[in-house]
């Protein structure tokens, strides 16, 4: 069978366009017909084939998908004698209009574009209609609405764009006012194959397959993410921690003065009564010497008055006053001696000396009660955790803690919260934080006082979504009041 171009009965006001049709050889007394009709048919057939080849060549020469979609929307009308073409892309169940004939830019919010997309969606879902690639849609088939009633072209032809493995990634919807013949459907099917091949060549067949697969995966990932947001997890916070002693003895300055010497080194073991700090005692020694001299003077005066009181009644009256002066001088001497003894600070208990550095204290003036160092039992340790105000969560006694110490980060130490400060306080680094103490469940052998690290505190159970977005929510509340 060979093809020929036959004129079609076009509607009024429409230029006739060549179409391709089969040529039947006439027999018998048809010489006159052969002599007159054959040249005209051959000429029309040649023009139709030239037009078909030209459109196919232009499709394969398109440089972008947008250029190809524009060509499909406007050049397909010349071969299929349709009145409007809609080019759609997507996947097998969701298609969107990317181009339409005689339209420069598609507004996807327009009622007609939405109506066309709904038609294709219903067509793909209908049983038995998704597999074939050619469909004639009568006027009564789509759902009745305003667009359906006002659309002038009642006969439609849906041609899918598919890859070699049959996966559909797009298609074109052809509409006209006359019914579709078998030959017109054949031509539109050939054009659809050509357009699909050109489209896949521009985009890349592997990329198209990946795009067809990634959308369901993205939907599944979105659903999975939403479901995970409601999974209950313990609320945790990370905060700096240090190994601190339990109930250490605080060594503070007993009086106002200057530290003359520190007699022990940091982390040195000391025994009860051992000298720790020597304060400057020059003034105190002089005051003690003066006080002792005052006592001797008062005692000499008392002896003189006592001896004279035997014969002199006036001295007998001064005896009580003189004794009081002796008592006052003795009290001043005892006070001076006590202050001199207190300038020599000693360890109240056995333990290790905990302070910063000798050079930070020698020659430094201190006031009464100022903390100098601590003496603590190295076998009694706990965790001291400073939780910044911005990261604070509700922590109750008994909450679990895991400490990752810098000296042994691979083996976290377990602890239990025993107390938490009610108000925030300034800590190292001039930061406002809540101080939490946690009791260690098991003390590793490598643990010692002063080791620092990071502690993870476990609070109440919350949803995973709240756990992840707690800080952004708090920030938005503080900045915008949302």
Image (cartoon, rainbow, N blue to C red):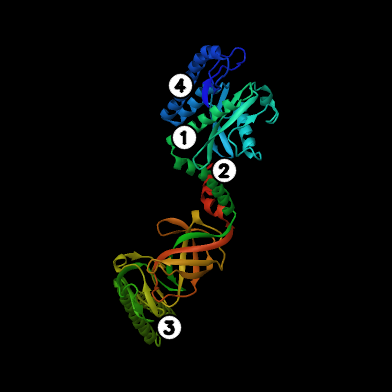
Q: Are marks 3 and 1 in contact (CB under 8 Å)?
A: no
The residue located at (47%, 18%) in the rendering is 47
Secondary element at image label 4: helix
Q: Which residue is mark 3?
A: 316
**Mark 2 packing: few (<14 Cα in 10 Å), some, or many (20+)?**
few
Q: CA distance from mark 3 to mark 1?
A: 137 Å
The residue located at (50%, 64%) in the rendering is 436
As displayed, is residue 221 above or below residue 40? below
Q: CA distance from mark 3 to mark 4?
A: 153 Å
Q: CA distance from mark 4 to mark 1?
A: 20 Å
Q: CA distance from mark 1 to mark 2?
A: 55 Å
Which of discs 1 and 2 lies nearer the camera? The answer is: 1
The residue located at (50%, 72%) in the rendering is 439
Q: Which residue is mark 4?
A: 50
Q: Is residue 12 left or right of residue 78?
A: right
Secondary element at image label 3: helix
Q: Which residue is mark 1?
A: 197
Q: CA distance from mark 4 to mark 2?
A: 69 Å
Q: Which residue is mark 2?
A: 481
- Which numbered disc, 4 or 2, marks the residue that appears first in the sequence? 4
Q: Indicate the position of residue 116 as horizontal and vertical percent values.
A: 61, 30
- Which numbered disc, 4 or 1, marks the residue that appears first in the sequence? 4
Q: CA distance from mark 2 to mark 3?
A: 88 Å
Which of discs 2 and 3 lies nearer the camera? The answer is: 2
Q: Is residue 349 left or right of residue 224?
A: left
Q: Indicate the position of residue 315 as horizontal and vertical percent values.
A: 40, 81
Is the C terminus in the top left, top right, bottom left or bottom right quadrant? top right
Which of discs 3 and 4 lies nearer the camera? The answer is: 4
Q: Is residue 56 left or right of residue 143?
A: left
């Amino acid at each position: 069978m060979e093809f020929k171009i036959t004129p079609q009965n076009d509607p009024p006001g429409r230029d006739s366009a060549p179409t391709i049709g089969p040529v039947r050889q006439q027999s018998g007394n048809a010489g006159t017909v052969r002599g007159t009709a054959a040249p005209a048919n051959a000429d029309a057939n040649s023009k139709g084939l030239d037009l078909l080849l030209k459109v196919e060549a232009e499709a394969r020469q398109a440089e972008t998908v947008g250029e190809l979609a524009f060509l499909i929307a406007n050049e397909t009308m010349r071969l299929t004698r349709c009145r409007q073409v809609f080019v759609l892309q997507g996947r097998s169940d969701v298609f969107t209009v990317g181009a339409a004939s005689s339209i420069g830019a598609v507004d996807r919010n327009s009622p007609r574009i939405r109506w066309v997309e709904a038609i294709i969606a219903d067509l793909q879902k209908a049983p038995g209609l998704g597999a074939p690639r050619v469909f004639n849609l009568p006027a009564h088939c789509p759902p009745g609405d305003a667009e359906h009633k006002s659309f002038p072209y009642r006969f439609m032809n849906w041609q899918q764009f598919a890859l070699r493995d049959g996966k559909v990634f797009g298609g074109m919807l052809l509409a006209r006012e006359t019914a579709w013949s078998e030959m017109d459907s054949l031509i539109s099917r050939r054009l659809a194959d050509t357009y699909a091949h050109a489209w896949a060549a521009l985009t890349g067949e592997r990329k198209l397959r990946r795009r067809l697969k990634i959308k369901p995966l993205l939907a599944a990932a979105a659903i999975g993410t939403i479901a995970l947001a409601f999974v209950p997890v313990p609320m945790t916070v990370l905060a700096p921690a240090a190994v601190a002693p339990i109930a250490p003895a605080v060594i503070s300055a007993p009086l106002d003065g200057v530290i003359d010497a520190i007699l022990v080194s940091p982390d040195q073991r000391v025994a009860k009564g051992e000298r720790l700090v020597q304060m400057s005692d020059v003034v105190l020694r002089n005051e003690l010497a003066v006080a002792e001299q005052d006592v001797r003077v008062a005692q000499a005066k008392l002896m003189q008055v006592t001896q004279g009181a035997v014969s002199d009644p006036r001295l007998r009256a001064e005896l009580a006053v003189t004794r009081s002066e002796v008592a006052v001088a003795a009290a001043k001497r005892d006070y001076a001696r006590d202050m001199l003894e207190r300038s020599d600070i000693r360890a109240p208990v056995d333990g290790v000396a905990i302070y910063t550095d000798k050079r930070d204290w020698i020659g430094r003036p201190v006031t009464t009660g100022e903390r100098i160092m601590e003496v603590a039992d190295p076998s009694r340790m706990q965790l001291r955790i400073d939780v910044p105000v911005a990261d604070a969560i509700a922590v109750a006694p008994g909450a679990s803690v895991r400490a990752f110490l810098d000296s042994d980060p691979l083996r976290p130490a377990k602890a239990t919260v025993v107390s938490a400060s009610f108000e925030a306080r300034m800590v190292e680094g001039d930061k406002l934080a809540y101080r939490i103490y946690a009791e260690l469940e098991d003390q590793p052998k490598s643990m010692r006082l002063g080791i620092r690290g990071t502690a993870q505190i476990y609070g109440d159970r919350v949803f995973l979504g709240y756990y992840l977005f707690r800080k952004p929510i708090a920030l938005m509340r503080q900045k915008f009041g949302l």
